[in-house]
Image (spheres, grey):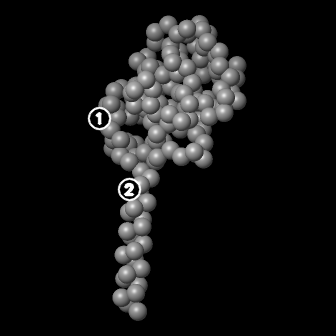
Amino acid sequence: MHKIVRNILILLTVIAIGYVLYNYEVVKVEGESMAPAMASGDYAIAQKSSENRQYHFNDIIVFEHDGKTLIKRVIATAGQEVEISDNKVYIDNVEFVGGECGDPCKNESYVLEDNEYFVMGDNITISTDSRYFGPIRKKNIRFEIVYYGF
């Protein structure tokens, strides 16, 4: 009986390790666009994206844009209206505090479609994000940051 319990525990451990290795990855933060939350050189634990996953306001995601891997925070999701006017960002006609553009932003207006997200870096004065390149598509999202600060 003791041997059966031990073998079951070993099997469960192997399955758990396999699950973690398949679904999670450690990513290294490069650049200061997410400071102060995440500084260049910090590491974060990221969960792989899936078709069924929906991202929400304040989620931090890792995605591909123009051949680069970027880490940004979701500030608007499908169905929301985002307007950039006079270097300020408005979500559903409410000014997003802290969304001012460091460099002049082009006045734009978006109504986010299904599977579109508007993202920004926490360090708004240096972050290149949706204020400059528009919404991102879900298919470009690789991970969601689930733990950071180490």
Q: Amino acid at mark 1?
A: Gly
Mark 1 falls on what kind of element? Answer: loop
- Dividing the image into 4 quarters, which one contains the N terminus? bottom left
Q: Is residue 20 left or right of residue 113?
A: left
- Residue at horizontal 42 percent and vertical 67 percent from the top: 15
Mark 2 falls on what kind of element? Answer: helix
Based on the displayed image, in which of its 4 quarters is residue 54 positioned? top right
- Residue at horizontal 59 percent and vertical 35 percent from the top: 57
Residue 36 or 143: which is nearer the viewer?
143
Residue 50 or 98: which is nearer the viewer?
50
Query: Residue 42: in sight, yes or no?
Result: yes
Tag in front: 2 or 1: 2
- Dividing the image into 4 quarters, which one contains the C terminus? top left
Q: Relative to 112, does residue 26 appear above or below in the rendering?
A: below
- Residue at horizontal 61 percent and vertical 12 percent from the top: 108
Q: Relative to 81, does residue 107 appear above or below in the rendering?
A: above
Circle count: 2
Q: Position of residue 80 (x, y in %)?
A: 68, 27
Q: Is residue 106 left or right of residue 126?
A: right
Q: Amino acid at mark 2?
A: Leu
Residue 76 or 94: which is nearer the viewer?
76
Q: Position of residue 147 (x, y in %)?
A: 43, 46
The residue that label 1 is drawn on is: 41
Q: Position of residue 14 (x, y in %)?
A: 37, 68
Q: Position of residue 112 (x, y in %)?
A: 65, 26
Q: Is residue 82 left or right of residue 16?
A: right
Tell me, for residue 129, which label it has, or none: none
Distance between the Cα atoms at labels 2 and 1? 22 Å
User: Would you say the residues marked 2 and 1 are in contact, meaning their CB atoms lie under 8 Å apart?
Assistant: no
- List the single residue furthest toward the left: 41
The residue that label 2 is drawn on is: 21
